Structure formats: structure tokens, C-alpha cells
């Protein structure tokens, strides 16, 4: 045996097998709880749907090892732009699906479209959000999945994210540099005052949707091209290292899947354990977004409930809902609605549950959970800073990566593309600052 090689004894191996079996059982119990208990214990069908769709979102984000924050963080830290390019594929695919809803709709106001205003708030919010996600290594949806995969980092980020959203409520609801748009369009005026891209192409014979799709495809192509150029330059400079999980996903995509026996350990491994590729994750997320929009007539948002949760915590410590409402310019009922009767909160809870279900059914829960339990005081301060800047950024930009970026682009809003630009700028600045701080 080579020096340094270690092996597990029979008892250790048996212990590991037993642990994985216990995790798998717990994982399927989690699936049962969501589908059965959720059906009978939650208030209504819509809340139940929110739980199921949130669970599916969390499962997909975790199994595909994907997200929005990584599009900038991975590119800066490893040189890989694969995730950014995959997001462009997902954005365009989702836009095609939402076109089916909007093109045939006689009344667009039946949908709650994220046509956000274009103003100083969008610019500052995008920069702040990108800056914060580089410090915390996650975004709003990412902090929920990270409650399972990186608890100390996630819990600190979550608390200060909620604080940032809470402090930003009165600004979002009262500042004209956030509520009023520099430019608008006819349909945009019906919502938050932004620009609805089909309004720019009413002459195309398809209500403007053909022109808007072509323009969006052009935007996606430009981002993909710039991403390739950036990655090429990093390789030429010798600073490209690639992302370990993306390398594994690449190998899975090249090898493909071949099924032998239906009931076997190999089949279980392929069906429940092996990570999905980024493209597979993008397709599933697109399907879930389409389902969410079809049922709720709205898009995907994550950040607002985090401010609500912070307010509820204050209520638990004796602060009156009326005082909170006066400060935030929300209604008192906003802070008194029960957690499991608030659709977006239940959906966010589902993201956490979905993350745990994948890791449990894959037998990876304990290994993943304990991998990031130790953090330094310096890291804790950076996570807190990342959380509060992201939270404030969401109020200025009227959403996070899920709402101000993904949903806005899927709803043909020009604001989504502008948010992407300034989020990347903020993320780059934040990563440079993080790199400098880590050297000290």
C-alpha cells in the first residue's frame, strides 16, 4: 500500500452505509410530507401549490448546482463563464414560454408583470446587489439553499439580508428615484412604469412579440459572445482553472445515461444521486417558472418575504405591527399574516425543503451540511455586509436576481437587462474587494 493511503474498516463502511440509508429514508419522508401533509394542513390549494413549486425549485437549484450569483462569482474566481452562458439559454427559453401566455392574452393586466422602472434606483440597486452577493457567495434564492449546505454563512447573510430589505421598504415605497421611470412604454405604464419590449415593435405583425424575441435573442447572443471572449482571455493569461462541479457535469453530459436493470443501485444512483448538468437544470427551472406563471399569473420573487420575516421577528420581540407599518409604509396586516398563509414565504420555505430532500435522497446531507460549519469572525462580518447590501439593493431595484433579473427578462422588461449589467459591475467590484481583503 502506498504511503498516505487510507482505507475504511468494515465497521466504518457499515456505519456509512447505514447513515446513507437513514438519509434516504428521511428524504422520501420529506417528499411524503410535502405532497400529503402539505395537501391537508395548508390553508388552500394555492398555498399548497406554492409549497410544491418551491420544493421543486430548491431541488433543481441544488441538484444542478446552479444559481444566479455564480454567474459572476464563478467567472471571477475560476474564469469559467459556463453558468452565465447557460443562464442566457434559460432566459430565452423561458421568454418563449411566457410569450404563449402574453401573446394570446386580451388583458395583460391579468398578469402581475415585472416591468420595473428604469431609474437611479435600478442602477444603484443592481450594483449593491452584485457587490453583496460576491461577499456572501449567494443571492436571495441561494441563501435559502445555503441554509442546508452552508448554515453559518447562510444564517448570517439571511438575518442581514432581511434587515436590508426591512430598512429599504420605506425607500422603495416613497422615494421617487425608485418609483418613477426615466423612460416608459404604453404597457409599461400599466405596471411599474418601465419599458415593455413588444411596445417597441408593434409594426412587426405579431403584436411586437416577434421583434422583442429577436432583440432578446440578440442580447443573449451578445452576453454569450462576451462571456466566451472573457473565458478565452483568462485561458490565455493562464488564470483559468475551471469550476470542479462544472467539470463533473461535463463528464456526465459526455458519458450520457445507460440503464440496465430497472431496480438496482446503479439505477438509483442515476435517477436520484448524480448531479444534473447546468442545461438540464436550466430546462427544469424554465418549466417550473412557466408553471408558476400559468398558475399564479405572476413571476418568481424571493427577497420581499425576507424583510417580512425580519419584521415578524421584531413583532415577536414586542414591536407593534402598527409601528412597523408606519416605518416601512406597509400595512399592519403585512406583518401579521401567519407564516404558512403567506404564499411567497411558503414558497421560500419550500426551496429550503427541496434542497434538503435532494441531499437526503442522494445520501449527501451530512457530508454537505458539516462541510461549512466553521467560519472566522472576518468571514462573518463579510457575510453580514453582503446580506445587508443585497437586501437594500433589492428595494432600490425592485427585486433580486429571481425578480429583477430573471422574471423581468421573462416578462419582456428592458429593466432586467439593465439590472444584469449593473449587477455584473457590482459583482466584479465586490469580488475584487473580497480578494484584497482575503490577502490581509
Image: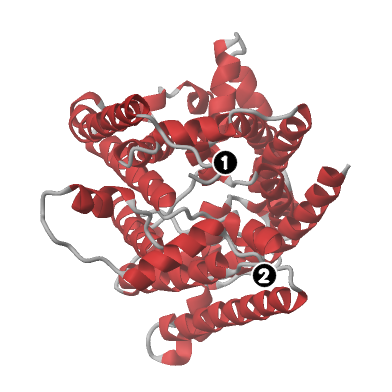
Label 1: which secondary element: loop
Q: Is residue 293 above or below residue 25?
A: below
Q: Residue 258: horizontal and vertical position, in percent? A: 21, 66
The circle on residue 344 is none
Q: Which residue is mark 1?
A: 4
Q: Secondary structure at mark 2?
A: loop
* Relative side of 393 to 252, left or right: right
Q: Is disc 2 in contact with disc 1, using a CB cutoff of under 8 Å?
A: no
Residue drawn at 54 percent across, 72 percent down: 85
Where is residue 352? Give x, y as percent.
42, 36
Which mark is in front, 2 or 1? 1
In the picture, measured across the screen, residue 291 lies left or right of residue 173, that is: left
What colour-coding does the image apply? secondary structure
**Front residue of 416 and 401:** 401
User: Residue 411 versus residue 173: which sits nearer the camera?
Assistant: 411
Pick the front one: 117 or 387:
387
Camera sees residue 190? no
Residue extending farthest to the left is 262
Q: Earlier in the sequence, mark 2 or mark 1?
A: 1
Residue in front for this viewpoint, 298 or 369: 369
Q: Residue at x 59, y 28 (%)?
A: 373
> Which numbered disc covers residue 183?
2
Where residue 407 sits: x, y (%)? 48, 59
Quarter of the image containing the C terminus? top right
Q: Where 261 sits versus 159, above or below?
A: below
Amino acid at each position: 500500500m502506498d504511503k498516505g493511503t487510507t482505507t475504511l474498516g468494515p465497521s466504518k463502511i457499515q456505519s456509512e452505509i447505514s447513515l446513507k440509508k437513514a438519509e434516504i429514508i428521511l428524504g422520501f419522508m420529506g417528499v411524503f410530507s410535502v405532497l400529503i401533509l402539505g395537501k391537508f394542513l395548508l390553508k388552500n390549494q394555492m398555498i399548497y401549490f406554492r409549497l410544491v413549486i418551491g420544493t421543486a425549485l430548491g431541488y433543481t437549484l441544488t441538484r444542478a448546482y446552479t444559481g444566479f450569483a455564480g454567474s459572476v462569482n464563478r467567472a471571477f474566481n475560476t474564469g469559467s463563464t459556463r453558468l452565465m452562458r447557460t443562464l442566457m439559454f434559460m432566459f430565452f427559453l423561458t421568454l418563449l414560454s411566457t410569450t404563449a401566455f402574453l401573446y394570446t392574452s386580451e388583458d395583460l393586466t391579468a398578469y402581475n408583470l415585472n416591468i420595473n422602472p428604469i431609474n437611479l434606483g435600478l442602477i444603484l440597486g443592481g450594483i449593491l446587489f452584485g457587490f453583496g452577493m460576491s461577499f456572501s457567495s449567494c443571492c436571495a434564492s441561494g441563501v435559502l439553499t445555503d441554509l442546508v449546505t452552508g448554515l453559518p454563512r447562510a444564517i448570517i447573510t439571511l438575518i442581514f439580508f432581511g434587515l436590508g430589505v426591512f430598512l429599504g421598504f420605506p425607500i422603495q415605497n416613497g422615494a421617487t428615484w425608485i418609483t418613477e421611470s426615466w423612460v416608459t412604454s404604453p404597457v409599461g405604464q400599466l405596471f411599474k412604469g418601465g419599458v415593455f419590449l413588444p411596445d417597441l415593435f408593434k409594426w412587426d405583425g405579431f403584436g411586437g412579440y416577434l421583434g422583442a424575441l429577436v432583440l432578446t435573442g440578440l442580447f443573449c447572443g451578445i452576453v454569450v459572445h462576451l462571456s466566451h471572449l472573457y473565458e478565452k482571455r483568462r485561458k490565455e493569461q493562464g488564470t483559468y482553472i475551471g469550476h470542479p462541479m462544472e467539470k463533473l457535469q461535463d463528464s456526465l453530459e459526455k458519458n450520457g445515461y445507460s440503464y440496465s436493470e430497472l431496480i438496482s443501485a446503479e439505477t438509483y444512483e442515476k435517477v436520484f444521486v448524480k448531479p444534473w448538468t447546468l442545461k438540464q437544470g436550466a430546462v427544469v427551472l424554465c418549466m417550473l417558472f412557466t408553471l408558476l406563471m400559468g398558475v399564479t399569473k405572476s413571476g418568481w420573487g424571493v427577497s420581499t418575504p425576507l424583510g417580512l420575516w425580519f419584521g415578524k421577528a421584531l413583532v415577536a420581540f414586542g414591536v407593534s405591527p402598527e409601528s412597523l407599518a408606519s416605518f416601512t409604509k406597509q400595512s399592519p396586516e403585512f406583518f401579521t399574516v401567519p407564516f404558512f398563509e403567506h404564499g411567497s414565504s411558503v414558497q421560500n420555505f419550500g426551496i429550503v425543503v427541496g434542497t434538503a430532500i435532494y441531499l437526503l435522497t442522494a445520501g449527501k446531507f451530512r457530508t454537505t451540511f458539516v462541510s461549512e460549519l466553521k467560519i472566522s469572525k472576518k468571514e462573518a462580518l463579510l457575510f453580514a455586509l453582503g446580506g445587508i447590501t443585497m437586501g437594500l439593493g433589492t428595494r432600490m431595484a425592485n427585486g433580486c436576481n429571481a425578480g429583477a433579473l430573471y422574471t423581468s427578462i421573462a416578462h419582456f422588461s428592458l429593466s432586467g437587462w439593465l439590472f444584469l449589467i449593473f449587477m455584473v459591475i457590482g459583482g466584479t467590484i465586490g469580488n475584487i474587494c473580497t480578494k484584497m481583503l482575503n490577502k490581509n
